[in-house]
Image (spheres, grey):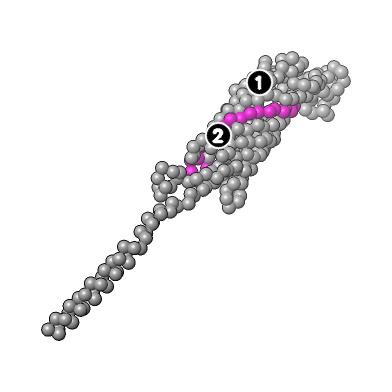
Amino acid sequence: MKISLVALTLALMCGSVSVSVAQETMSQPRPEPTKIVEPAPVTVDQRQFSVGLTGAYAITVNGTPGFTLPTVPTCCASYSSTSGTGVILGGVIELPLASKLELSARVLFQSASVTFATNEETTIRVANTVESTTLRHTLESSQGYVFVEPVLAYRIAGGLDVMAGLRIGTVLSATYSQDERLVDPTQPVRFEDGTTVRNATSGDLPNTSTMQAGALIGLRYMLPMNAAGTLQLVPEISYAPMFTNLVSDASWSVSPLRIGASILFSISKKVEEKSPLRPGKP
């Protein structure tokens, strides 16, 4: 009988404790739901365009099958193709069109100088004898041009680009000097005026074609000059065959083979990078 009373007492005590715990649990506030923290947006520098300066040394190919200046007196039959030199300086702006494609626009000043020389074998009379001698016909010219060049550059490997484009410009200035002289001035012979030089003329090149147009093909290599890659040195080699002549009534074109380099500075802006962790958002 005593054991049953003790058991009943324990049961009542356990029940009271359980009811108290349950009441206490029910009286506690409901926990708030856990908030999902979105990852912070990642920003990257996106290049918008590049600006810079460019310069080159030019070997000018003065291509012609043979010409003379029609309005300038000369006894020369014709001048043939030769090479000259020049310098090219200007500014450049580049826009990215795709991951491997760039559009480059250049405004350039080009100087050029060339000397044509043609030797002519002739005979002269010295006293009562006839002797052979050589006449040298010389034409020297200097020119200045301004060109606009739209060029596409395509990345083929690493930092190597192949370039192709057009060049359109005008002649700013063009001068010439021309004469004929005896190659051997020690010979006892003179021209009609008693000198060893004749038909010496100089001045502005007559009948210049103000409109100049051609193409451009070449290669270049991009070399970063800082850790961010925003400053680049770009050596290049290119050739620009011209479609137009320098003089309207003579087959004389000036096509430069250029070896030079550009310095480009990139302009960028901050943009959010697309992330799969933020669906529907950049």
Q: Is residue 1 magenta?
A: no
On the question of residue 138 being in view, the answer is no
Quarter of the image where the N terminus is located: bottom left
Q: Position of residue 21 (x, y in %)?
A: 29, 69
Mark 1 residue crowding within 10 angstroms, few (<14) / some (14–19) / many (20+): few
Q: Quadrant of residue 76?
A: top right
Q: Main secondary structure of the magenta part?
A: strand
Vertical order, 93 against 35 (above or below): above
Vertical order, 119 against 39 (above or below): above
Magenta part of the protein: which range? 140-160
Separation of disc 2 and disc 1 at Cα?
24 Å
Q: Residue furthest right?
A: 194
Find disc 1 in the rendering and name its residue.
Answer: 211
From the viewer's side, name the closer residue of 89 and 141. 89
Q: Residue furthest bottom?
A: 2
Which residue is rendered at x = 58% and y = 34% of the image? 104
Vertical order, 161 against 139 (above or below): below
Q: Amino acid at mark 1?
A: Met
Vertical order, 19 against 8 (above or below): above
Find disc 2 in the rendering and name its residue.
Answer: 103
Which residue is rendered at x = 68% and y = 20% of the image? 210
Mark 2 residue crowding within 10 angstroms, few (<14) / some (14–19) / many (20+): some
From the viewer's side, name the closer residue of 168 and 61. 168
